[in-house]
Image: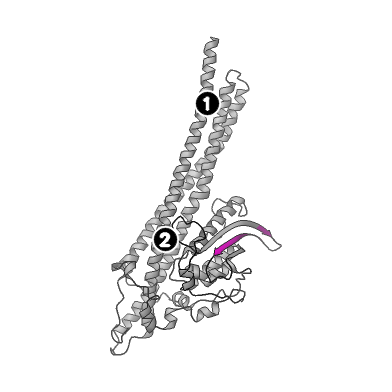
Amino acid sequence: MSAGTPRSLPSSGQKSIQDICHPLSAEESALSRSPDVLNPSSSAGEKDLSLPNGTPVDTSSPASSSSLLNRLQLDDDLDGETRDLFVTVDDPKKHVSTMETYITYRVCTKTTRTEFDLPEYSVRRRYQDFDWLRNKLEESQPTHLIPPLPEKFVMKGVVDRFSEEFVETRRKALDKFLKRVADHPVLSFNEHFNAFLSAKDLNKRQGLALLTKMGESVKYVTGGYKLRARPVEFAAMGDYLDVFTQKLGTIDRIAQRIIKEQSEFLMELREYGPVYSSWSSFEEDLHDPLEGVAGCVSNCSGALEELTEDMSEDFLPVLREYVLYIESMKNVLKKRDQVQAEYETKLEAVVFREDKKTPVPTDVEKCQDRVECFNADLKADWDRWQNNKRQDFRQLLTGMADKNIQYYEKCLAAWESLIPLLQDKQEAKGETN
């Protein structure tokens, strides 16, 4: 940047993401900017390159050519993309001690990345370890959207947090969280993510307050800076998130009401069927049809139970995950606004200064770099989030349709099986007459 009048902040609403060059990846800019701006973790990050328990961690830059260029596809990918990092969460186990009772999950990793010492890892983690990882990602990658974790406390409608249903629901959510991080082109190279996947002993009590310089610059932007107007493109994002929140909230409330009504109906069916079985013992001529009705009601109640469980365990968790996702996205938008407000305030001070010949202060240039970095990263993550959302909801709604069709087919088949019994009884009665 030449000395004199500073560049004005480019309007993000008039450029597509393809037209915007990420400031941290521009080679020309790299030659003229401060190393602290280009690599905000270069100085503070060196202090953080260790496990929370103090064990040194050998990590590499995300720009590692050997990792990015020599990727090996370890498994079939439905999206047709080549990946080099696969993570799964399984095998929950309950641990009981004198102080507490908790659940741990096995985290298995397969990778060909050179940043890892081994191609495979298997470690056990509890919920607070996942929470530690997410906090670290937020601190060290403030310009990116961090996937949400399931709620820490017992989910609504679940009484026992050690029940198989609750543990399995949480396992699925934790598995999805790690998979989303592993698929991210930046987050998956974070040193804390590497330590989470590979370190046997993850002691979080040390190092929680360590932040990278980029994290500090965003974290300590105070409310003293007021944003004049959010750029059109990001204002549209905020409006979309508000509407999406309302829609998800309405669907969630109705879905929970449906589940409640289905559960009540299921209890009635379970009482309804045995009545016909009891009745059949007093009616010799109607014994078979009555037993048939009891069997039909039993089959229908079983089908309804499956449908209700699918809705509770598969449908509602996706809605809740995206409600949390929206909150995460709104937080990133707020941080972007704070950085832009800081830049606008400092830029205004430069424009109205008396000495027009003095070079633009370095902190103004750094603020502009951070704004551009936020814009590029946020728009890239927004596109990735929208793609994931389309895939998730397409799969969710298709699955819901299939399960409802299966439910009605089972009920129809149950009642159709009763027709021959009634016809046989009618024919037998006619022959007797």
Question: Bounds of the magenta span?
Answer: 94-111
Which image quarter: residue 201? Answer: bottom right
x 55%, y 65%: residue: 131
Q: Is residue 71 left or right of residue 102?
A: left
Percent across and percent down for residue 219 are: 46, 74
Q: How many marks?
A: 2
x 58%, y 33%: residue: 271
Residue 98 within the segment the image draws in magenta: yes
x 29%, y 86%: residue: 4
Residue 397 drawn above or below residue 17: above
Q: Toward the viewer: 299 or 261?
A: 299
What crowding class fits label 2: few (fewer than 14 Cα within 10 Å), some (14-19), or many (20 or more)? Answer: some
Q: How is the image coloured?
A: one colour
Label 1 sits on what residue type?
Leu
Secondary element type, mark 1: helix
Percent across and percent down for residue 297 are: 54, 32
Q: Which residue is denoted by mark 1 in the rendering?
A: 418
Secondary element type, mark 2: helix
- As measured in the structure, the alpha-carbon distance from the residue carrying label 1 to the one carrying label 2 is 50 Å
Q: Is residue 332 visible?
A: yes
Residue 75 within the segment the image draws in magenta: no
Which image quarter: residue 47? Answer: bottom right
What crowding class fits label 1: few (fewer than 14 Cα within 10 Å), some (14-19), or many (20 or more)? Answer: some
Q: Which residue is denoted by mark 2 in the rendering?
A: 385
Which image quarter: residue 195? Answer: bottom right
Q: Toward the viewer: 193 or 363?
A: 193
Residue 214 drawn above or below residue 162: below
Q: Earlier in the sequence, mark 1 or mark 2?
A: 2
Q: Toward the viewer: 274 or 168?
A: 168
